[in-house]
Amino acid sequence: MNTLHLTTEIKDIAKAANIIREGGLVAFPTETVYGLGADAMNAEAVAAVYEAKGRPSDNPMIVHIARASDIGQLTPMLSSDIVAIIENFWPGPLTIVVKKKPEVPDRTTGGLDTVAVRMPDSKPALDLINLSGTPIAAPSANLSGSPSPTRAKDVIADLDGRIDAVISGDDCRVGIESTVLDLTSEVPTILRPGIITAESIEAALGKEVIYDPSLKEAARHVALDPAGGVQESDFQPKSPGMKYKHYAPKADMLVVEGQRDKVKAEIERLKGLNEKLGNRVGVILFEEKAFIEAAHDFFARLRDLDHEEVDLILAGALSDTDGVGFAVMNRMLKSAGYNIVRVS
Ligand code: AMP
Ligand code: MG
């Protein structure tokens, strides 16, 4: 397939919108990561997204809308929590899981009776959805399993020739995917951490918000088992996407956790030893507490190191238990396949 390369100019977005209306696939920039979009109400178009990404079909997609009121096409009823989320966080990197209307194809929701919805804060994304005249289902625009794409070149590296069009825009401002908040359970529950944290959602809703226990489990198991080796199958996550191999670079990857100076020293030591063996080693070590920058750079760093063809990536863990650093750690541990050592 010949992939059409488009800009964010409105005449190009109009071409892309035509493709969406006809059931085709278009990659586009959002503020979080690039998305691979299809008409969310067209089951065949959505099936083609799974195909292009090589994504397991029980992993549901986030449906993107351009006006908050369009959520009415997807869910039967607005609760006060839904309204508070819309007023406080949309447009922005927060997805809510709500009860779905029968019109939303099962393909889009992986057979669940709920649907994940978000209004992105990105002009090209909003223009595309508006001109398409339909909600757009869009997972990240990468091959399933590889690091999420935060730059147009990352999308092209993975999907050129597999989809109808790519809209190349700016690098993504946030750099990690949206926070996913389940509003269908008794207590609002974060299924995927992002830059919008439990604390700020609690402030907006005026009630307790929890993290899905499997998110904390992953971190806890790792902490208890210094040898690492945690199996993702040990967890029973509610969000189907959390059980698959995710974000993996081509290189082997090891996360080093502990007190900052010791982490730095251990990374230097392991780097030296591995280089002596003839391995090319890449290091990812963010400034302490620079969690927003870490979110912005993490996936791009993984892709750049793969491009440099390193054999091993050594990454310093971020010490944060529930904020933005926790969201980055969620991705870092997955990309390393939970391969972690503690230094103390
Ligand atoms: P991605 O499309 O790659 O950004 O991933 C979307 C994430 O949202 C995945 O982890 C999905 O499993 C999750 N998700 C989407 N829809 C639902 C839903 N209805 N219930 C629970 N999780 C969902
Ligand atoms: Mg993804």
Image (cartoon, rainbow, N blue to C red):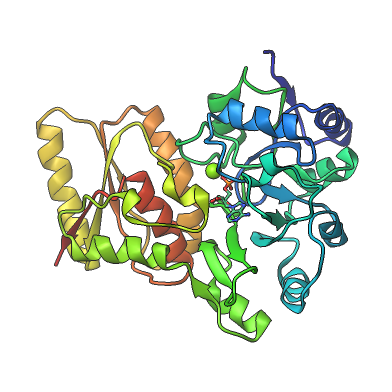
Which residue sits at x=10%, y=33%? 276
Q: What percent of the width, then of the height, locates residue 286?
A: 37, 57
Is residue 291 in sight in this rendering?
Answer: yes
| The N terminus, quarter of image | top right
- Quadrant for the C terminus, please: bottom left
For image coordinates 34% across by 65% down, the residue present is 217
x, y percent for residue 68: 83, 61
Residue 61 is at least partly visible in this image: no
Where does residue 153 sit, x and y in percent of width and height? Answer: 57, 30
Viewer-proximal residue among 309 and 339:
339
- Between 222 and 106, which is closer to the camera in this rendering? 106
Query: In the image, is 109 to the left or to the right of 257?
Result: right
In this view, the residue in front, 26 or 101, is 101
How many discs mark residues in the rendered view? 0
Q: Nearer the viewer, residue 56 or 156?
A: 56
Residue that appears at 57% across and 36% down? 57
Residue at horizontal 10 percent and vertical 30 percent from the top: 277
